[in-house]
Every structure is written in C-alpha cells, then in structure tokens.
Amino acid sequence: MTHEHRIALLIDADNSPADMIDEVLDELAKEGVINIRRAYGDWKSPHLNAWTALLHDFAIQPMQQFAYTKGKNATDAAMIIDAMDLLYTKQLDGFGIMSSDSDFTPLVMRLRANGLRVFGFGEQKTPKPFVNACSKFLYLENLRRPEEAPSAAPADVVVPDGNGAAKPAPARADAKTLRSDTRLVNLLRKAVEAAADDEGWAGMGAVGQHISKQASFDARNYGYAKLSGLFQAIGLFELRTHGKGLQVRDKQTPQP
C-alpha cells in the first residue's frame, strides 16, 4: 500500500484571512491527508467571527487562547507549544502553518530538522525569514481563484477579500523583474545544471525536484501557474519538448 503523508494544519486565526481556508486545504491535500486541523485565537473576540462561521464546514478544531497580556501575542506561543507536542506524540510527515508572522521561523526550522516538511501560507507582508525557512511557501494572494482575482486585471485594480477589504490583484513578474532577482536566477541556473545531461538539457520535472530539496519556492509566487512558464518568461533559458516531457537548458551553456 502507498503511504499517505499525514499533515497537521495549524492556523494563526488572529493573523490569517478566513476566506482563504478552502484554497489552503486544497493545496495541502496535494501533499497528503490533513489529519489534524486546528485554529488558534481568542474566540470571544468579534475579530474572529469570519473564522467561527467556517470551523464546522471545514472540520477545524478551535483552540482557545486568551490574551493574558495586552500587546503580547499569546496565540503564537500556544501554536508553538502545540506543534512541539504533536511532533513528539503523533506520527506526522509534515505541518502546514497558516500565518504571516515571522515568530514561527524557529519552529519551522526545528520541525524541518526533525525531517518533516513544512508548508507555509501567508500574505505578501510575510517576512522573508519565515518564507525561506519553509519547505514550500505560498502567498495567499496568488492562491486566489480566477473569479476572485483575475490575472488580467490592471495594476491599479483592487480585488475585495472575504472581509470586504480591498487588496491588489496578483500580477505576473516581468522578465526585467525576474532577472533582477539574483537569488532566483542562481537557483534556476544551479537546478538546471544539476539535472542536465551532456548537452545541457534537463527535464523540467527533475529541475523542479532539485529546487524543492533546497529552497522554499513556488512559481505561483511570481504569478506563473507552472515552473515552465517562469523559465520561459525570464528569457535566460531554452525550452523544448522531448518525448512526452519538457526540457530546459541555460542559454549560457557552451554549444558543441
């Protein structure tokens, strides 16, 4: 029998939009079975009413955390303690953490050190240390479905979220923006080089696997549905169809 990866989803309800839970669960379902679903916050606060309305529909267990001290985020501490308990008492393969708070960076690093994968979900404001610490991180704005955030919307168009607030529609990064991201360019080039044959061609699947082993990366964070679209847009690589698959080669590769 094929082993189904078991995942625990921990939600910082104080710091996450409730209207994106469907998309988050859909993404995590691609990685395994979400056995544990918990949302943390002070459920007496009207701020969490949007979450309260969704708990039963998505089988999410509310974890009450009172704000003992004003200005201190007790929810973060509760999530971290719970995560460590789950790490040692449950046989899990991974964690999903829905938050835009960098306070979870040490937790993510600890979980990964124990061999678990960590999938992060947060808004564009999420600090880079948290984003980079995850096995895979997805910006919630880029997970919005087409009817919620049309990709063809002009830059000055805003898309309402589930709470009525206006948010910028996600946009694709153009070639100039992509090329100026030195970290991204190096990541792509090294991944292609690692998976390349004698002629410099590398299978797109092998390149994606190599990237996933070393970096928190997803092409959708740059506005592209697939890795191949990102390679094509950046303009530094050649692409070709080979058999039933797609191959990529760095244009800097010496030609025979």
Image (cartoon, rainbow, N blue to C red):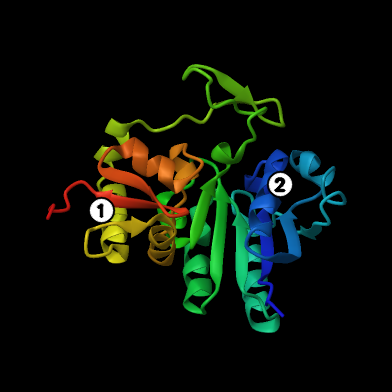
| Horizontal side, residue 96 vs residue 194: left or right | right
What is the crowding at mark 1: few (fewer than 14 residues within 10 Å), some, or many (at least 20)? few
**Marks 2/1: CA–CA distance:** 33 Å
Q: Residue sitting at 76 percent across and 43 percent down?
A: 48
Amino acid of disc 2: Ile
Can the viewer see residue 65 in this picture? no
x%, y% of residue 120? 55, 56
Q: Nearer the viewer, mark 2 or mark 1?
A: 1
Above or below residue 39? Residue 152 is above
The quadrant of the picture occupied by the C terminus is bottom left
Q: Which quadrant of the structure image shows residue 162?
A: top right
The quadrant of the picture occupied by the N terminus is bottom right
| Horizontal side, residue 251 vs residue 244: left or right | left
Quick one: 156 or 149, which is closer to the camera?
Answer: 149
Quick one: 198 or 204, which is closer to the camera?
Answer: 198
Q: Residue furthest front?
A: 243
Q: Which residue is mark 2?
A: 21
Q: Residue sitting at 32 percent across and 60 percent down?
A: 191
Q: Residue furthest right?
A: 56
What is the crowding at mark 2: few (fewer than 14 residues within 10 Å), some, or many (at least 20)? some
Above or below residue 9? Residue 57 is above
Q: Earlier in the sequence, mark 2 or mark 1?
A: 2
Quick one: 217 or 233, which is closer to the camera?
Answer: 233
Q: Which residue is mark 1?
A: 186
x%, y% of residue 244? 47, 54
Q: Which quadrant of the structure image shows residue 214?
A: bottom left
Amino acid of disc 1: Asn
Above or below residue 160? Residue 46 is below
Element carrying mark 1: helix
Quick one: 247 or 138, which is closer to the camera?
Answer: 247
Element carrying mark 2: helix
Can the viewer see residue 78 in this picture? yes
